[in-house]
């Protein structure tokens, strides 16, 4: 699997790699296209080869809660390997994205047979669970200022180096990460610019004082 460099796949034997290759399909998605739909039957797991993907939970009406920006090396629908029959969130391409669709039964067979691979999958699953708890804490215990500061720090972090994340997201997308209204997001961004914390240029956001944002995050 020449396009896959994730540590978990490096632990596979040549026979296991061949086994996975026979049970995966390579797909390319344009910006804005839906990769998975919340509640849809999950017969496969997606592995992101390149690009950025928005992971979100759909609420009632038109409101969503954005959870993460997924990138190369991330799994989508990993819980379906462990007896979850449907996707419990939706995903959409932020940029042009390439993924492998891997049959979940094939991943389960490899997990049972290869202990090193299983440990890496469990680690990935635990990381996802921990990050979801952090999101719940932010939504439950922080005010709008703290929520938006957290989101700006997350989207401007080094893990997305080389990508223009802000230029690929709308103000509503950013609001849905923070769990606040679009109007409040726009108002706070303008206030942050006035205070010298960032610079706005159309959709682009350039952070100029990460320390100030971190202080706002601490205060909540």
Image (cartoon, grey):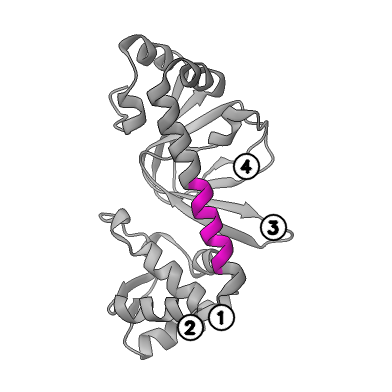
In the image, taking residue 37 as reference, residue 45 lies left or right, namely left
| Mark 2 element type | helix
Quarter location, residue 65: bottom right
Sequence-first disc among 2 and 4 = 4
Quarter of the image containing the N terminus? Answer: top left
Sequence-first disc among 4 and 3 = 4
* Residue at 43% across, 74% down: 149
| Mark 4 element type | loop
Question: Which label is found at residue 73?
Answer: none
Marks counted in the figure total 4
Q: CA distance from mark 2 to mark 4?
A: 31 Å
Whether residue 26 is visible here, answered yes or no, is no
Q: CA distance from mark 4 to mark 1?
A: 28 Å
Can you identify the residue that label 4 sits on?
37
Q: Is residue 131 magenta?
A: yes
Q: CA distance from mark 2 to mark 3?
A: 24 Å
Q: CA distance from mark 4 to mark 3?
A: 13 Å
Quarter location, residue 84: top right
Can you identify the residue that label 2 sits on?
188
* Residue at 44% across, 70% down: 150
Can you identify the residue that label 1 sits on?
184
Question: Which label is found at residue 59?
Answer: 3
Q: Residues within 10 Å of mark 2 (few under 14, many from 20)?
A: some
Q: Residues within 10 Å of mark 3 (few under 14, many from 20)?
A: few
* Mark 1–mark 2 CB contact (< 8 Å): yes
* Mark 4–mark 1 CB contact (< 8 Å): no
- Residue 191 is situated, as x and y percent measured from the top left of the image, at 43, 88
Q: Which residues are magenta?
A: 128-138
Q: Nearer the viewer, residue 142 or 5?
A: 142
Q: Residues within 10 Å of mark 4 (few under 14, many from 20)?
A: some
* Mark 2–mark 4 CB contact (< 8 Å): no
């Amino acid at each position: 699997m020449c396009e896959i460099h994730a540590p978990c796949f490096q632990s596979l034997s040549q026979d296991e790699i061949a086994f996975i290759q026979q049970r995966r399909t390579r797909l390319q998605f344009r910006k804005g296209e839906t990769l998975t739909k919340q509640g849809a039957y999950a017969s496969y797991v997606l592995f992101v080869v390149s690009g950025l993907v928005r992971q979100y939970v759909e609420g009632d009406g038109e409101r969503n809660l954005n959870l993460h920006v997924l990138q190369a090396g991330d799994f989508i629908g990993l819980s379906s390997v462990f007896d979850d029959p449907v996707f419990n969130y939706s995903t959409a391409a932020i940029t042009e994205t390439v993924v492998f669709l891997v049959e979940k039964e094939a991943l389960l067979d490899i997990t049972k047979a290869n202990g090193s691979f299983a440990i890496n999958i469990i680690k990935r699953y635990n990381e996802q669970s921990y990050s979801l708890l952090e999101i719940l804490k932010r939504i439950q215990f922080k005010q709008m200022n703290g929520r938006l500061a957290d989101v700006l720090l997350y989207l401007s972090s080094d893990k997305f180096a080389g990508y223009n994340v802000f230029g690929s997201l709308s103000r509503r997308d950013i609001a849905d990460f923070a769990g606040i209204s679009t109007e409040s997001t726009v108002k706070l961004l303008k206030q942050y610019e006035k205070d010298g914390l960032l610079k706005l240029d159309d959709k682009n956001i350039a952070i100029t004082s990460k320390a100030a944002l971190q202080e706002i995050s601490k205060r909540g």
